[in-house]
Amino acid sequence: MKSIATFKSPDSANVNITIEVHEKYNESDHGNPITIYEVVNSRKMPAFKGYINQVESTDGKKKWMSITALSREVDSLGNYKLTPKINEDGMFVDNSGKIVSNHNDAEQFYQKNKIDGKHFYIQKGVLTIKNNKAGTNELTSQTLLSIKVYGEEEAKYIKLTSSLAKTNPDENERNKIYNELSSFKQKNGTWATMFINKGHDFLRANGHEIREKKSSQYTAEKRDFNDNIPF
């Protein structure tokens, strides 16, 4: 599927994540499909699918993007539970179908959470536009993105608590739950900055103010010395 945007956090960030945005399956779809690549504890995790949805406040003054994906199982330490791929003979195989010697070399699949026997989506993170340096009115050299990523258990809690609030017939109780949930969202999750490697026009088309980094006018051709010396 064609990639129309790529957002990436620095390798040294608290969250090492890359998001590829793809064209919509149908123009009437609410969001765009995405592929998410994560590095956790220096280990590249299997890619997984999700969606990016454009969201705005009721007054239309604020815009952000929501990242949703199927909920994945984690162990007591927060590590993803993975299942190695095996062939019909019970042998471990990689993503090309080649037999490998152990489960670590095999293609891995995430184990998914279920509610009432069904997989469910969670809000994995939130993306916002970053045009100013933190706490100032000073412009960044280019538009960046800020992402807040929720852990699987945090996102699962948000999902279940939100569902609980929606089904509560008592307005006061419902508002109380929403306020507690809002506080939980603010206190939890991990922030990171992301670069817009590709997709500036995609963001502009969704109503965001995007500035691209100006290319340097001081090029090698304009210098009075030769810096193309082989070493």
Image (tube, grey):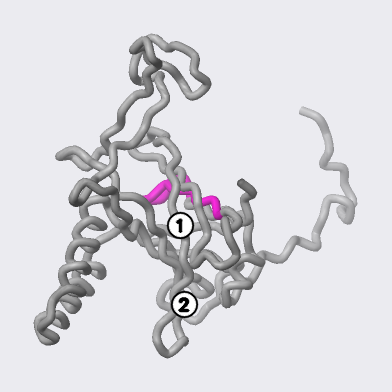
When the figure is inspected, residue 6 is found, relative to residue 210, above or below; the finding is above
The residue that disc 2 covers is: 63
Callout 2 crowding tier (Cα within 10 Å): few <14, some 14–19, many ≥20: some
Q: Amino acid at mark 2?
A: Lys
Instruction: Give the secondary structure at mark 1.
Output: strand
Residue 110 in the figure: left or right of residue 188 = right
Q: Nearer the viewer, mark 2 or mark 1?
A: 1
Q: Residue at x 76, y 28 (%)?
A: 231
Q: Position of residue 53 (x, y in %)?
A: 46, 66
The residue that disc 1 covers is: 51
Spatial distance from mark 2 to mark 1, Cα to Cα?
A: 17 Å
Residue 88 in the figure: left or right of residue 119 = right
Q: Position of residue 82 (x, y in %)?
A: 30, 31
When the figure is inspected, residue 221 is found, relative to residue 214, above or below; the finding is above
Instruction: Give the secondary structure at mark 2.
Output: strand
Q: Earlier in the sequence, mark 2 or mark 1?
A: 1
Q: Residue at x 28, y 37 (%)?
A: 111
Provide the residue span drawn in magenta.
10-21
Q: Is residue 80 magenta?
A: no
Q: Amino acid at mark 1?
A: Tyr
Q: Position of residue 133 (x, y in %)?
A: 48, 72
Q: Residue at x 38, y 23 (%)?
A: 85
Q: How many marks?
A: 2
Q: What is the quadrant of residue 216 in the picture?
A: bottom right
Residue 203 in the figure: left or right of residue 133 = right
